[in-house]
Image (cartoon, rainbow, N blue to C red):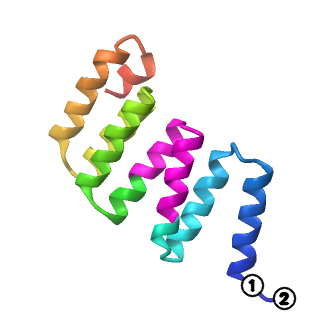
């Protein structure tokens, strides 16, 4: 049998139509597009996902994608948008890790944790990650 990228794409679209609220399927097709260097299509999937689903995993995946494809400044803008749309500790933790581990900006990571403490000082997972 013969492998087909078109068939792969079609299967992912069919799966999303069948389970439209599955963030993992949307992340999978965004990764598929990125692996094919179809960056505009991947970006569209992320924008649509955060619009429709508005879950931390979607925003975190989008921020990481933007960091890989566009840079630090643009990924920080996605973090800003995410925390305005969905105030969850996961967003702050992921953004701080991205700053520390990928951008090597420890001061920025610390600033993100400190700003998150204003909202999540009673959240045990957030405090332990700090």
Give the CA separation, mark 1 to mark 2. 7 Å
Q: Secondary structure at mark 2?
A: loop
> What is the crowding at mark 2: few (fewer than 14 residues within 10 Å), some, or many (at least 20)?
few
- Asked if one can make out residue 92 in the rendered structure from this viewpoint, the answer is yes
Can see residue 102?
no
Image height of 121 relative to 6, above or below: above
Q: Quadrant of the N terminus?
A: bottom right
Q: Is residue 59 left or right of residue 100?
A: right
Q: Residue at x 34, y 41 (%)?
A: 79
Where's residue 126, x and y in %?
39, 23
- Is residue 58 within the magenta segment? yes
Q: Which residue is rendered at x = 52% and y = 67% of the image? A: 41
Report helix, strand or loop for mark 1. loop
Location of residue 124 in the rendering, given as x and y in whole percent from the top left corner = 43, 16
Residue 30 falls left or right of residue 125: right
Start-end of magenta stretch = 42-63
Against 8, is 118 above or below? Answer: above
Residue at far right of view: 1
Residue lying furthest top in this view? 122
Residue tagged by mark 2?
A: 1
Disc 1 packing (10 Å; few <14; some 14–19; many ≥20): few
* Residue of label 1: 3
Which part of the image, by quadrant, shows the C terminus? top left
Query: Which residue is pictured at 31% across the width and 63% down the height?
Result: 70
Q: Main secondary structure of the magenta part?
A: helix
Q: Nearer the viewer, residue 87 or 121?
A: 87
């Amino acid at each position: 049998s013969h492998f087909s990228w078109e068939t792969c794409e079609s299967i992912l679209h069919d799966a999303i139509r069948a389970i439209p609220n599955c963030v993992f399927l949307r992340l999978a097709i965004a990764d598929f597009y990125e692996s094919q260097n179809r960056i505009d299509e991947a970006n569209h999937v992320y924008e649509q996902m955060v619009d429709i689903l508005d879950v931390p995993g979607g925003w975190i995946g989008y921020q990481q994608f933007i960091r890989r494809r566009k840079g630090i400044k643009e990924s920080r803008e996605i973090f800003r948008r995410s925390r305005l749309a969905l105030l969850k500790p996961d967003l702050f933790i992921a953004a701080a890790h991205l700053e520390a581990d990928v951008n090597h900006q420890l001061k920025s990571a610390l600033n993100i944790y400190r700003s998150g403490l204003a909202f999540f000082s009673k959240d045990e997972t957030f405090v332990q990650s700090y």
